[in-house]
Image (cartoon, helix red, strand yellow):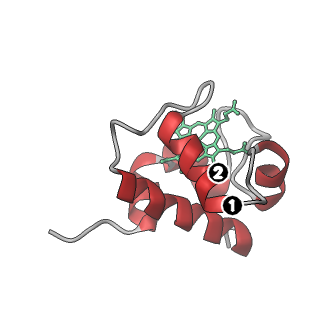
C-alpha cells in the first residue's frame, strides 16, 4: 500500500486542532511562522527537528504521537508543516 503524504497525515492526525495552521486549543500557539519562531524551541535552527520533537513527545494539551505515527510519518508531516508555515498556509 502507498505511504500517506504530509497533507494526508496532517488531515488525519493534526487538523482537528490545527485546521489551516491554527490552534483551536491554545489560540496563540499556531503553526504560522511567526508563532513557531516565538514559541517552538529550536525552530529557527532546524525547523524539521523542532516539529518532529513536538509531535513525537507532545506538550501540555497536545498529545504525543510516538505511539500513533511511525518516525517516517512524523518526519513527513513535520516537513509539510514547515513548508506550509513558509507559504503562510495559503
Ligand atoms: C502545538 C504540530 C496535533 C494541540 C503545536 C506546535 C506544533 C504542533 C508544531 C507548536 C506550535 C507553537 O508553539 O506555536 C502538530 C502536528 C500534529 C498536531 C504536526 C499532528 C501530527 C495536535 C492535536 C492537538 C494539538 C491532535 C489537540 C488534541 C496542540 C496544542 C499546542 C500545540 C494545545 C500548544 C502546546 C503548548 O505549548 O502548550 N502542535 N500538532 N496538536 N498543539 Fe499540535
Q: Residue 83, image x and y in percent?
A: 63, 71
Q: Residue 25, image x and y in percent?
A: 65, 32
As measured in the structure, the alpha-carbon distance from the residue carrying label 1 to the one carrying label 2 is 6 Å
Q: Do the residues labelled 1 and 2 touch (CB within 8 Å)?
A: yes
Residue sitting farthest toward the left: 1
Residue at 37%, 59% (x, y): give it: 72
Residue at 78%, 59% (x, y): give it: 44
* Residue nearer the viewer, 39 or 42: 42
* Residue nearer the viewer, 21 or 34: 34
Q: 25 above or below 6? A: above
- Relative horizontal placement of residue 52, taking residue 41 as reference (left or right): left
Query: Ligand 1 closer than 8 Å to the CB at disc 1?
Result: no
Q: Residue 67, image x and y in percent?
A: 33, 36
Instruction: Please name the residue that numbered disc 1 is placed on.
Output: 46
Query: Ligand 1 closer than 8 Å to the CB at disc 2?
Result: yes
Residue 50 is tagged as 2
Query: Can you tell me which quadrant of the image ligand 1 is in?
Result: top right
- Report which quarter residue 61 is drawn in: top right
* Residue nearer the viewer, 42 or 31: 42
Residue 7 is tagged as none
Q: Which part of the image, by quadrant, shows the N terminus?
A: bottom left
Q: Which part of the image, by quadrant, shows the C terminus?
A: bottom right
Amino acid at each position: 500500500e502507498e505511504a500517506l503524504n504530509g497533507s494526508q497525515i496532517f488531515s488525519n492526525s493534526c487538523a482537528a486542532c490545527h485546521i489551516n495552521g491554527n490552534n483551536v486549543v491554545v489560540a496563540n500557539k499556531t503553526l504560522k511562522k511567526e508563532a513557531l519562531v516565538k514559541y517552538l524551541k529550536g525552530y529557527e535552527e532546524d525547523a524539521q527537528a523542532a516539529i518532529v520533537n513536538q509531535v513525537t513527545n507532545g506538550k501540555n494539551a497536545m498529545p504525543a504521537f510516538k505511539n500513533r505515527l511511525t518516525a517516517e510519518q512524523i518526519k513527513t508531516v513535520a516537513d509539510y508543516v514547515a513548508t506550509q508555515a513558509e507559504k503562510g498556509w495559503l
